[in-house]
Amino acid sequence: MSNVAVVEPRVLDGVAIAAEIKSELVSKLAEAKERGYTPGLAVVLVGENPASQLYVKSKVKTCAELGIYSEMHTPAASVTTEELLALVESLNERDEIDGILIQLPLPEHVDTERLLEAVVPEKDVDGFHPINAGRLLSGAPAEKVLAPCTPAGIMEMLRRSDIPVSGQRAVVIGRSNIVGKPIAAMLINASATVTVCHSRTRDLAEITREADILVAAIGRAGFVTADMVRPGATLVDVGINRVTDAAEFERFFAGDAKRMEGFAKRGSTVVGDIDPAAFRVAGAYTPVPGGVGALTIAMLMSNTVKAAAARRSGN
Ligand code: NDP
């Protein structure tokens, strides 16, 4: 009989942490009410992308649950950049709107960059405006920055799970403006030693194996395999990839009866950018679903409440 202790990896439960954040927001919202205002979020959804419709629906629903005012603007896919700029301008000027969210991706003919820059930084609850991106990069104090929701959620998750960051070796796979770059900046600000990898990186596995914290934001199902992971590392899986192919399903989830049942019923399931087999060698990991994704909306709510308070205190 072997006497080697098998240590089960810790599951970082995004749903539970999101619930914690939302319950803290409830008391902040009560304070806002006492001061005579209700934070308000305007969501702009262009066209009929089903995934975007789903995301927007849950954002609006969460606002309603918490008592944040929300309104939706749903121009047709044929809308012009000029028309959208006029809409953003009107939302910028309205006092009861504290946050403006433009759901991405926009149709190709729309100038996304121009539109994101048109949102006043004080109402930029997605944290995509160059002013907020610049403040984040320069390490401005948290109250001065509206940070992108997904990476902000990851930092909240690490903090609330007591995962040490300072002095740790962090590796980020992905360099998008939405996830990769801002999470790298946040990890640097929290004193991690950070390496950012992407599709041109050589010897990727050698680099990822050095990570105490490995963040995967790639958009490729099960890309990070167990041999790319240092045993005991914290794995943060940002990817959301739909699996519909039975052979691919088998590769990731063979023997997982619960998944099997859902897959048989719906014909699809979601897998992250990390192969579930790699979670078994981790010290801690964020599951998909129920990990990072659960925190993104909570952080959007948090940014809206923060933007509302900051506008009223003149910060
Ligand atoms: P992008 O497509 O914008 O970026 C993907 C990044 O992965 C790029 O930097 C790309 O490199 C890199 N990459 C692609 N292939 C490889 C490879 N073979 N080796 C190394 N790096 C590679 O995606 P996003 O950052 O927007 O999203 C990433 C994932 O996270 C997606 O699955 C998305 O659905 C999910 N997501 C989840 C959210 C949540 O709330 N949980 C929120 C936002 C995104 P290069 O730059 O060289 O092309």
Image: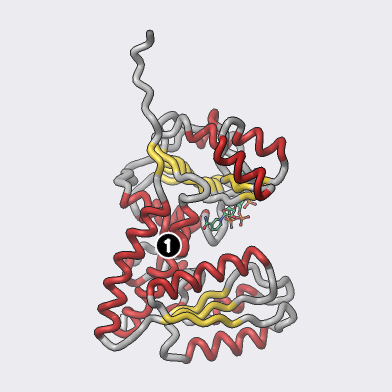
Residue 102 on image: x %, y %: 57, 75
Q: Looking at numbered disc 1 in the image, what kind of residue is underneath it?
A: Leu
Q: Residue at x 61, y 32 (%)?
A: 254
Q: Residue at x 41, y 64 (%)?
A: 299
Q: Quadrant location of residue 231? A: top left
| Looking at the image, residue 184 lies above or below residue 90 | above
Q: Residue at x 71, y 72 (%)?
A: 107
| Residue denoted by label 1 | 137
| Looking at the image, residue 35 lies above or below residue 281 | below
Residue at mark 1: C-beta within 8 A of ligand 1: no
Q: Quadrant of the N terminus?
A: top left
Q: Is residue 195 something one can see in this rendering?
A: no
Q: Residue at x 62, y 67 (%)?
A: 52
Graded by Cα atoms within 10 Å as few (under 14), some (14 to 19) or many (20 or more), the crowding at tag 1 reads: some
Q: Is residue 310 something one can see in this rendering?
A: yes
Residue 263 on image: x %, y %: 64, 44
| Looking at the image, residue 159 lies above or below residue 203 | below
Residue 305 on image: x %, y %: 36, 75
Query: Residue 241 or 118: which is nearer the viewer?
Result: 241
